[in-house]
Amino acid sequence: MSVTAGAVAAPAGPTGLHTPASTDAANTPLRAAAVREQVWFDGELVEAGAPRADLTTHAMHYGSGVFEGIRAYATVDGGAAVFRLPEHLERMRRGAELLGMSFDVRQATAAVLATLRANGHRDAYIRPLAWFGAGGFGLDVEGHAQHLMVSTTATRVHLNGQRARIGISPWRRNPADALPPLKLCGGYVNSILAKREAKARGFEEALFVDHDGFVVECTGANVFVVRDGTVTAVEHRDALPGITRDTLIRLSGANSRAVHIDELQDADEVFACGTAAEVAPVAQIESRTYGDNPVTRALAEAYAGIIRGESADHVHWLTRV
C-alpha cells in the first residue's frame, strides 16, 4: 500500500520474524516479559502501542476502512493454522476495491502470518484493517494516505459455550442496495445501535429482521434453524455472506433460503455462527426458549475438529503458521 510520510507516526520496529520456542495449551505464549505484543503496520512489525493516527484520519471521521475477523487455531500436530485465510482476504479485497483502495492479498497474507509468529500466538483472533488516513475533511478519498495493519490477540477457545439470549432489534439491517454486505467499517454503527438496544433489555445479542418479518442476521453472525432434524441456513440479501456460514452449509448439507421470524419461533433449535461466535447455540429469542440443541452441539464438535486439523478432508481450509 502507498503511504504518505507523516500521515501516521510509527517508530521503526523489528523486521525480522521469529517463531516462539513453545506455547502452552491455553495459548499463553512462553516469552520473555520484556517482549511486547507486535502489530504489522505498513510493511513492518512494531510494538502494538507505537502507531498513532492523525486526528484528520479520513476513516476516523467517515468510516472509510475495511476489515476482517479471522481466527488461527492450535492444531493437533502441535502447530497452528489460520482457518480459511484466502477467503477472508479476498472478501476484504472486494471491500477495499469498492472504496477505491489498493489491496494486495499476498502482502496481507504475509502480514497475518508474520504477526502471529512474532507474537507466538496459536489460538488467536486476527484483525486486519485497511483505511484511508490523514487529509482534508471532505468525503473524497483521493489524496489520502492508505494504511494496512494486522493485530493478533491470543484467545481461549470455548466452542459450544454460553447459550445466547437474543432480542429482536427495532433497527433494520443496512439494506444491500444502500450499503453492500461486506466488512466496511462505517456499516457496523448499525450493529452497535442494535446491540446496545438489546443489551439494555437484558439480552446478549440482537437479531435483525426486515420490514416483512424475514430474518437477516445477528449483529455479527449468521443464523441457522433446525426443525425435525433438518438444518436450514437463513438467506437474506442484506446479510453478510459468512465464511463460517458457508463452512457449516457444506458440513451439514443445509439448504439456504429466506426464513420468516415465525419459523424461528417454531424451530427446535436456532444457532448463530461466525468467525468470533464459531457455532453458538441460541437459548432464547425474546420470550421463546430452546432446549438442549443436540444438532447444534454435533455441528460445533465437527467444526472444532476441522479447525484443529483433525479432518484430512478439510486441511485445504488451513493455512499453516
Image (cartoon, rainbow, N blue to C red):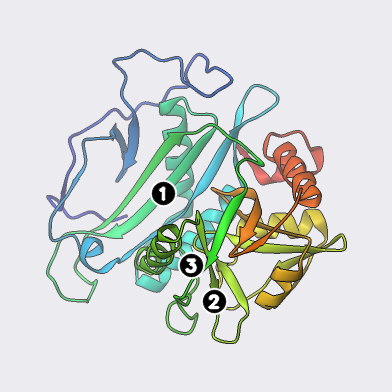
Q: Residue furthest right?
A: 228
Q: Alpha-carbon neighbours of circle 2 within 10 Å: few (<14), some, or many (≥20)?
A: many
The N terminus lies in quadrant: bottom left
The residue tagged 2 is 238
Q: Name the residue under label 3.
A: 182
Q: Quadrant of residue 314?
A: top right
The disc, 2 or 1, on the residue closer to the chain's N-terminal end is 1
Cα distance between the residues tagged 1 and 3:
14 Å
| Residue 125 appears in the figure | yes
Is 140 left or right of 279, judged from the image as shown? Answer: left
Provide residue 250's location: percent of width, then percent of height.
77, 57
Mark 1 is on which residue type? Pro
Earlier sequence position, callout 1 versus callout 3: 1
Query: Which residue sits at x=70%, y=69%?
Result: 264
Viewer-nearest of discs 2 and 3: 2
Residue 307 pos. (x, y %): 67, 39
Q: Disc 2 residue type?
A: Asp
Q: Is residue 259 visible?
A: no
- Which residue in the structure is indicated by mark 1? 128
Residue type, mark 3 in image:
Leu
x and y, in percent, of residue 136 in the image: 12, 69
Viewer-nearest residue: 15 or 215: 215
First reached walking from the N terminus: tag 2 or tag 3: 3
Element type at mark 3:
loop
Q: Which residue is located at x 31 percent, y 24 percent? A: 36
